[in-house]
Image: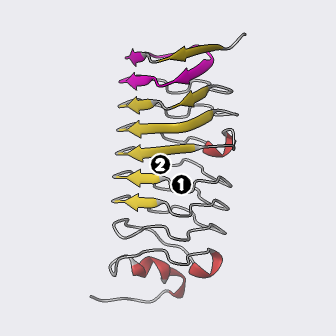
Amino acid sequence: MEEGYIADKTFEKADSLLKAEYENCIFKNCDFANQDFSDYKFSDCTFQNCNLSIVKLTNTSFRDVKFIECKMLGLHFNNCDEYGVTFSFDACHLNHSSFYNRKLKKTIFRNSNLQECDFSDSDLTGSVFDNCNLEAAIFDLTILEKVDFRTAYNYAFDPEKNRIKKAKFSSTGIAGLLIKYDIEIES
């Protein structure tokens, strides 16, 4: 199948896409659950109120892509094209997704659910988790330097197994860094 190029188009309530390179496109209220987006390319695109759960992302390219109010359960971002991956998430449900071994510097996660997400071996330098639920998210050998966790909640990870230099935490969230000690902290 020959790939096409589609630019400056809005897709509303779509349930499938042609394999193509999409530039400056908007996807609204689309249901792409269980689709195969392998080798698709998205740049300067916005997905709003879309269902992308369990979409196959082998060698998928995301450059400057915004996801707003999207359901994105069980995605394997670790299978995406690793070069130039840049995206942001606002009010998204990303539970059970994997960002394993990805370079995600300065990624913005805002008002999102990231329960049981895997960030192992990732580089999140300078990223922001603004009002995000990180319950049971995995941070192992993760670069978390300059990451802003001040309004994130339910996170728990070992600072000795992750690089956290100059990361920002709130006093209420600091207990998540002491979880391995099985101590009780009272306010």
Q: In the image, residue 52 lies at what x, y percent?
A: 48, 31
- Report the span colored magenta: 10-30
Answer few, some or many: residues within 10 Å of disc 1's Cα (few below 14, many 20 plus, some between 14 and 19).
Answer: many
Residue 95 circle label: 2
Residue drawn at x 33%, y 66% is: 151
Judging by the rendered image, the residue that carries numbered circle 1 is 117
Residue drawn at x 36%, y 88% is: 185
State the residue lying farthest toward the left.
187
Q: Is residue 135 left or right of residue 160?
A: left
Q: Secondary structure at mark 1?
A: loop
Q: 36 above or below 78?
A: above
Is residue 18 in the magenta section?
yes
In the rendered image, the quadrant that contains the C terminus is bottom left
Q: In the image, residue 5 lies at what x, y percent?
A: 60, 15
Q: 11 above or below 155?
A: above
Q: Amino acid at mark 2?
A: Asn
Q: Is residue 165 left or right of residue 47?
A: right
37, 44: nearer the viewer: 44
Question: Of marks 2 and 1, which one's residue comes earlier in the chain?
Answer: 2
Answer few, some or many: residues within 10 Å of disc 2's Cα (few below 14, many 20 plus, some between 14 and 19).
Answer: many
CB under 8 Å between callouts 2 and 1? yes
Residue drawn at x 38%, y 58% is: 132
Answer whether residue 80 is visible to the viewer in this image: yes
Answer whether residue 71 is visible to the viewer in this image: no
Q: In the image, residue 145 lies at what x, y percent?
A: 55, 71
Q: 173 above or below 110?
A: below
Q: Amino acid at mark 1?
A: Cys
Q: Secondary structure at mark 2?
A: loop
Residue drawn at x 35%, y 24% is: 29
